[in-house]
Image (cartoon, coloured by chain):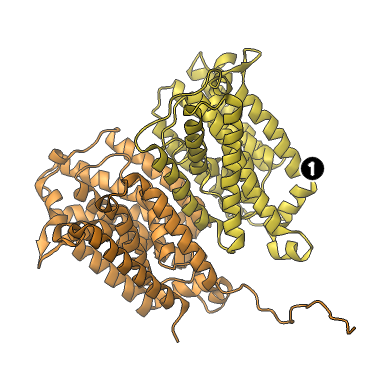
Chain colours: A orange, B yellow
Amino acid sequence: MRSALQRREAVLVGILAAMIVVITVRAPVFLSAGSLDTLATDGGILAMMALVQMIALLTGGIDLSLAAIMALVGMVTALMSRAYPELPVVLTLVTALSAGLVLGAINAVLIAVIGIPPIVVTLGTMSMYRGAVFLVSGGTWVNAHEFGHAYLAFPTARTLGLAHITWITLAVIAAGYVFLNHTRAGRELYALGGNRVAARYVGISESRVALRVYCLTGTISGLAGYLWVARYAVAYTETALGFELQTVAACVIGGVSTAGGKGRVLGCLLGAAFLVIVLNSLPLIDVSPFWQMAISGAAILAAVIVNSRDEAPRGKRILPRATAAKEPA
Amino acid sequence: MRRWELVLVILLVAVCVTGSFVSPYFLDIHNLFDSTQAFAEKAIVALSMTLVIIGRDIDLSVAAIIALCAAIVGWLASHGVGTTGLALASVAVGTAAGAFNGAIILRFRTQAIVVTIGTMSLFRGIAYAMLGDGAYTQYPEGFEELGQGYLWGLVPYELVAFGILAIAFTLVLHRTVIGRRLYAYGNNPDAAHYSGIHVDAHRFWLFTVNGAMCGIASLFLTSRIGATRPNIATSWELDVIAVVVLGGVSILGGSGSMPGVILAVFVMGLLTFVLGLMNVPGIMMSIITGFLLVVAIATPLVLRRLMPRRVG
């Protein structure tokens, strides 16, 4: 039997297909190689980040700080590239991953060891990390001409016809899929999000899971921060501002429950694809880009309403509903 | 006085003492009153947000509601509507937007956080669709008085409004059955439901009131800055939530007090003012806000762990 989530995904595929047809009919350029390439790179970062956001959401948590981590790590790597333009890309990647891990670990310790709710921790660190971007950069921008050549070239360079950014996205998605579906640690996330008490009784440590989750979201955010900065060739304090909510939106559209325990990689990717197409294709069909935000808001609400029908009732009714007694005449 | 409020009073005193040391302009009564204008609007929204969070909900769309109200008020003003009409319109739009949030959340039994992420895009998106990259700058004569005027030439109207609303919200939360019921369902919605409290009706009205407060805040904000762009009040929702949590309200619902939040409003507001006097860039304030938020929540948790439980 197909689950509610799979039905949702089928509907979403239908909507995406319809959107693509409508857009292509009105603007055939949409299906050109260049346009698809932009979609793949822009969408890649969102898909990757939506996936890690989903991992946090599955446990009933949330990571609001991931866009700020992207901005901070992006800025740190950009400053390094400005100071040492010849720096090999491998070192940039290692820096990005490890800086992300450190920032994620701060979240993880506050959540898992001290026991503060994830939404409060990541709200706080979001402000701090965002402010730290200003501190390390002194409020300045790193502009396109100041980066080292390799730094900018790597993400968009191609191997076997695909941009590195796309390869990285595919690798993260594949790893995420295997992790969530075929490892013990991944299944524990679902168990914990689905029923906290039951998970505790079968010996799942809530704090160990939280430690893993927020270190992971931080690390991938660090990587995405470098890719984002290199992709747009600029680093400044407001890099990826508000992106954390886009990742949550992609998850919600893809049927991931913010209450935890429900969500699949495919749904999450479809949600990200939906958002990216809405955000990128409006100018092609002569809709003012100023409508972007309202349309994505309406899409999120529609998704929320559709999701709501799939949410299982919290309790089971054991007595028949009282009906108005009908007195015999 | 409870312990948390005591901590906030100490913080407030510390901020004032520091302020008077670092700048001769801090203890000037006019400057102090003027500084309140800069945070009164967020403070007004924080009052109703406190009730929303105690009731286990959250509203991330407040800044977007402010933007929507501002855009519609700006549009009406450019079509010749007078100050009274604008004031009514702002509150009406805010109320309607809040009611919309409440209706969706309750009708479809969904979580407030996701619905308000959606309406956050929707409401601000409407403001963007109306304004594009333009701005409304035409306001009727006397409109600026609301956000820039003073009662008896000393107390800004914004502070007066905040004061009146703060008293009203404190009374509602701590002296009426509405407040008692709020704590009851914030602690245990199911038990409250079975005790005959109309939890859903309460939640709906709280979202509506929260929207109305955004309408009032928006009115003061547009009047104070005299121009409306669609990015007005960007990311205020996080400042408002941070101040509420700093005021001792549990993000999980069920506990917190209005005096705590009011104290937190002044701590954060005056701290911003002091940093401004010290020429510290505004973004530094976001580091401090984030830091205070985390430390404020972490401290009691760490203390509880370090000190073995004695009694109670």
Q: What's the residue type where badge 1 is placed?
A: Arg
Q: Check the image and report above or below for A15 versus A184.
A: above
Quarter-of-image position of residue A280: bottom left
The residue located at (54%, 27%) in the rendering is B81
Residue B296 seen in the figure? yes
Q: Is residue A22 above or below residue A130?
A: below
Give me the residue at 53% from left, 57% from top. A115
Residue A169 lies, with reference to residue B116, above or below; the image says below
Return the residue at label 1.
B175
User: Against A303, is B239 above or below?
Assistant: above
Q: Count all numbered tags in the image, as a single digit.
A: 1
B243 or A99, nearer to the observer: B243
Look at the image and tell me in which quarter the C terminus of chain A lies.
bottom right
- Tell me where residue B265 appears, x and y as whole percent: 59, 34
Pick the front one: A320 or B235: A320
Percent across and percent down for residue A252 are 44, 63
